[in-house]
Amino acid sequence: MTAAEFKKKWARYQGKESAAYQEHFIDLCRILGQPTPVEADPSGNDFFCFQKRVVKGAEFLNLEHPDCGDPTERGFADVWKKDCFGWEYKGKKKNLDEAYQQLQRYREALYNPPLLIVCDFDRFIIRTNFNGTVPDIHEFTNDQIDRPENWRKLRAAFEDPEFLKPQRTTAEVTRKLAEKFGEVARSLYKRESAELADAHTRAEVNVAQRRSLRIARFLNRLIFCFFAEDTDLLPRKLFSELAKTALDDPHHLSQALELLFRTMATGGLFGAHKIRHFNGHLFEDATVFDLNDDERRILADASEADWQYVEPSIMGTLFARGLDPSQSAALGAQFTGRDDIVTIVEPVLMAPLRREWAALKASLLPASKKDKPKPGARARLEAFLKKLRKIVVMDPACGSGNFLYISLQMLLDLEKEVITFATSLGFSFTPEVGVHQLRAFEINPYAYELAQVTVQIGYLQWRRDNGFDNDHTPVLQNLDGFQNEDALLVPHFHNKARTLKEAQADEHKADTSLKFYTERQWPQRGKAATEFVDARWYDEHDEDGGWSVEDGGG
């Protein structure tokens, strides 16, 4: 079942609570990828079940309000998961405050769960119940269930209630992880990297660039592995345990990481664990750098965090903090924040698409819910989706990839909106917008690698948070449109003038070519766009009707 099908099914339901609450909860488990109570707890009572017995008499029952339910049946909580939640249902448009009061009255009999949740098939209200804190309330409707923020809340209710503990946010998680991992990045670069800026010959450039890229790719493999194990792309705790054992055995860490990276490149067995095929360039080499005592300690500490809730913007933060502060400004490392990026992406990329979609949607709306879809509706929806999927977004100075990630996220959100509307008309489409629509230039090797991991994690996270699986193989896509080059200048090399004897003597020695630059030749634009924002532009390709969007900075 998809989120759109769930929304459509339960928007129509008008029956009693008792007739359907278990089916509703099972459907919810399905779209969230969670085991049902019976699947998780066959005992029917130990830690996850329907109708958890909470009282033996009527001392906790509110008999003054018959709507609270039949007293002979109200010795049970509708759904209970130990250390996660108590859950009560009511019929549509019933008083959910009464259901909440009921949970409050017998929460101790449920071992005082951290979350108290009530639902009337249309509204969901999650109240925190942590000792010593002011309760937070999270409320949304059936129609809003697949919004990323609500999807995260429901997943957290099943998997990690601590995420909803008051004052803990994804921004805080991201900031703390960035601070920890930034120390490792800065320390490793200071100790291991060759300075690309000092390279003048082809050989020097190649050596320095390869070294810097390997360091960057190694750091990003570590970040991705933490994210992967907390989102079940890797076996749970696999990478964290490796990081912790490294405190006492640094050589074991290097050997284990190299073997794990090689296995992730193709898929296979790592010890007793089955590893999926990841690759996507990130694991095409398995270079590992030895970490010192402080770096291994930071890595072990970072393994305790819950990386599934990290914001992809952590990559930008790491970029800014992982470099030498004296070089950050020169390299453009003060990455562009989300609000600033949206001011560019919304009017240039999204506004024309939203206008077109609003007009299309209005023309396809049936006169009533009983009417059949209008003739040609599926073909018109398919044509608009095809247009979304042909858009190419390019950033010629991508930094750590925030512009690309946010652009992709907004395109995915719009595609999902179209698919959801199509489902309401009886048509089925699957999401196809993806990272293959992104292009980038970045001269700094660290940022070049960070940008790729930013968009890969952001894409996987978006799919998970919006109810779509990540079961495709390989897990990561090849980002062949990303180039570690200057967008404006093309490097060339020529040799010093020398005699034939000197040339023969140097035949088997390192290349001493001198470096110089020429201006990169860009293809001619087609039909000029009517909207310009801060020198960014988009145009239409003559061949296939796709669009491209360029940004002047990361």
Image (spheres, helix red, strand yellow):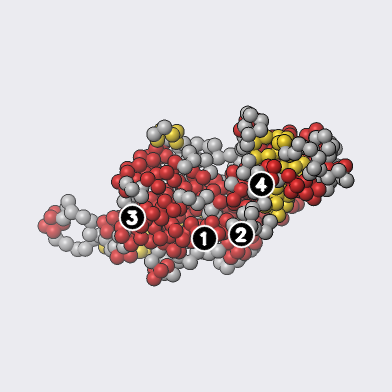
> Around disc 3, counting alpha carbons within 10 Å, would you say few (fewer than 14), some (14 to 19), or many (20 or more)?
few
52 and 387: which one is in front? 52
Asked where in the image residue 520 lies, by quadrant, the reply is bottom left
* Residue 538 shown left or right of residue 56 in the figure: left
Choose the circle earlier in sequence order: 3 or 2.
2
Badge 4 is on which residue? 112
Q: Return the disc, 2 or 1, that comes first in the chain's sequence.
A: 2
Determine the secondary structure under disc 1. helix
Q: Residue at x 36, y 50 (%)?
A: 247
Asked if the residue under mark 1 is in contact with the one under mark 2, i.e. CB atoms within 8 Å, the reply is no
For mark 1, does the 10 Å Cα neighbourhood hold few (<14), some (14 to 19), or many (20 or more) residues? some
Badge 4 element: loop
Location of the N terminus (image quadrant): top right
> Which residue occupies 31% across, 60% down?
191
Q: What is the number of the mark on residue 293? A: 3
Q: Mark 4 or 1 closer to N-term?
A: 4
Question: Mark 1 or mark 3: which comes first in sequence?
Answer: 1
Foreground label between 2 and 1: 2
The residue type indicated by label 2 comes to Gln
Calculate the distance from the C-alpha at mark 4 to the C-alpha at mark 2.
20 Å
Residue 333 position, x and y percent, is: 45, 65
